[in-house]
Amino acid sequence: MELTELTLRELQRMLADKKVSSAELTRAFLARIAEADARVNAYVTVCEDQALAAAAEADRRIAAGEAGPLTGIPVALKDIFNTEGVRTTCASKILDNYVAPYDATAWARLKQSGAVLLGKLNMDEFAMGSSNENSAYGPTRNPWNPETVPGGSSGGSAACVAARMAAAALGTDTGGSIRQPASHCGVVGLKPTYGRVSRYGVIAYASSLDQVGPVARDVEDCAAMLQAVAGHDPADSTSVDTPVPDYLESLREGVKGLRIGQPKEYFIEGLDPDVKAAVEGAIAVYRSLGAEFVEVSLPHTDYAVACYYLIATAEASSNLARYDGVRYGERVDEGGGLIDMYNRSRAAGFGDEVKRRIMLGTYALSSGYYDAYYLKAQKVRTLVRQDFLDAFAKVDVLLTPVAPTPAFNIGEKTGDPLQMYLSDIFTIPVNLAGTCGMSLPCGLSAGGLPVGLQLVGKPFGEADILRAGHAFEQATVWHEKKADI
């Protein structure tokens, strides 16, 4: 039996029954990383010594009867979470040697639960991208076909879980950065409601959109990870103080009588035929389980991508101002004076996509254009959110595709940023609305690549989409398919 093939929940039961130790599990995953990561490039940093030490401590806690929910489980983190004693690069040359002096709250909660950190995962630089090709450490490859992208920006998190190089992972989702790579890699990814999980200690891209969430093998594992990290954090002023349900318990409720909304704007001409067929197959499964479908409308969907790229780039231009070679970041030669040092440090440290978004955002916020662009985008965002609230007055959850196509080839869209931005056309509105969404596998394309289904819930309705996703998994086998790598 390959330990790395087991789900997080199966590993939890084996640890509780003392059929395996955390040290054995950790060594198995480290061996799998050594075997497979040269073909995937999911890891930026593997912290073997720290992982083995944490596993030994986990085994001590289990023997002493002091185990937490995730004690001894090997996990990995997108390299955007600050981790005390382990470098945090955000996949950027400007932070190549940065070691944070503290833990992000999400990681601190996993650590308190007893999880073992295997390492930090590749991503698009500062979470800017839809393909994981914008990393200073090279692109991550999709384990299902290494010639294709894993999606972005949490492509390392999705590829790592798909290639069995961690039991589960954390990512961040600003416009679909958990759900789109989860769809392309055939795993489950959940973006919680904004405010459900603390962003404290997570390097900011677009502060009003970023949200931390789990990537896992199946919905039950996803629920276990969310349970560990969700909840109010006084260190994050945007964290919401509202009770956290028992997500694992909610999985048992089934979908009989559930009212599922089908937004007509998401089933558009141009949708890849394989994606369309897989999602329609999923709808048929839900009907057979007793769910009721209702056509709904989200009329401002067409404006969401433009609105998102104005707001996100504006916030990015502000957030990334701190990387100037003085407060944060690598510093180049100071010979030309202070301003010259700023300019050359940022020019050398940031990649092309980051520079593009900083310039777009700076322009949108500049005097004379703020009202025309940024302020108007915020007004449109309000309309997008109201669309979702109106739909949720009629239905319990929404069902949509995750991405217009399966994973595309590496390099296919790098020369056309607008085409790349459209990869997130079905996920971006959920971030603008601030509600929750989840991607889970629902089929394979003719080329053998995974296709994902998106379930969108009401604000703080994570339990609804988890139980709907779990019911689908119990009736299908798509989540059991795995990459041959």
Image (spheres, rainbow, N blue to C red):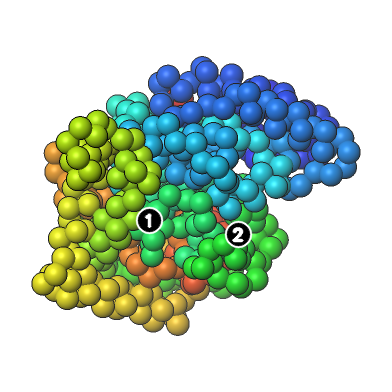
Q: Quadrant of residue 132?
A: top left
What amino acid type is highlighted by mark number 2? Ala
Is mark 2 in CB contact (under 8 Å) with mark 1?
Answer: no
Which residue is found at the position 60% from the left and 24% from the top?
Answer: 48
Tell me the quadrant of the picture where the N terminus can be found: top right
Question: Residue tagged by mark 1?
Answer: 174
Query: 431 left or right of 160?
Result: left
Which residue is found at the position 22% from the left and 63% from the top?
Answer: 310
Work out which residue is located at the far right of the displayed protein and give it. Answer: 64
SS for dot 1: loop
Front position in the image: 149 or 417 = 417
Query: 404 left or right of 72?
Result: left
Question: Residue tagged by mark 2?
Answer: 230
Q: Position of residue 255 (x, y in %)?
A: 58, 65
Label total for image: 2
Front position in the image: 342 or 289 = 342
SS for dot 2: loop
What amino acid type is highlighted by mark number 1? Thr
Q: Using the image, tell me which numbered label, if any, was put on residue 6.
A: none
Q: Position of residue 361 (x, y in %)?
A: 21, 58
Query: 467 left or right of 191?
Result: right
Which residue is found at the position 42% from the left and 68% from the top?
Answer: 434
Q: Can the viewer see residue 465?
A: no
Q: Residues within 10 Å of mark 2 (few under 14, many from 20)?
A: many
Q: Is residue 61 above or below residue 225?
A: above
Query: 130 left or right of 258?
Result: left
- The earlier-in-sequence mark between 2 and 1 is 1
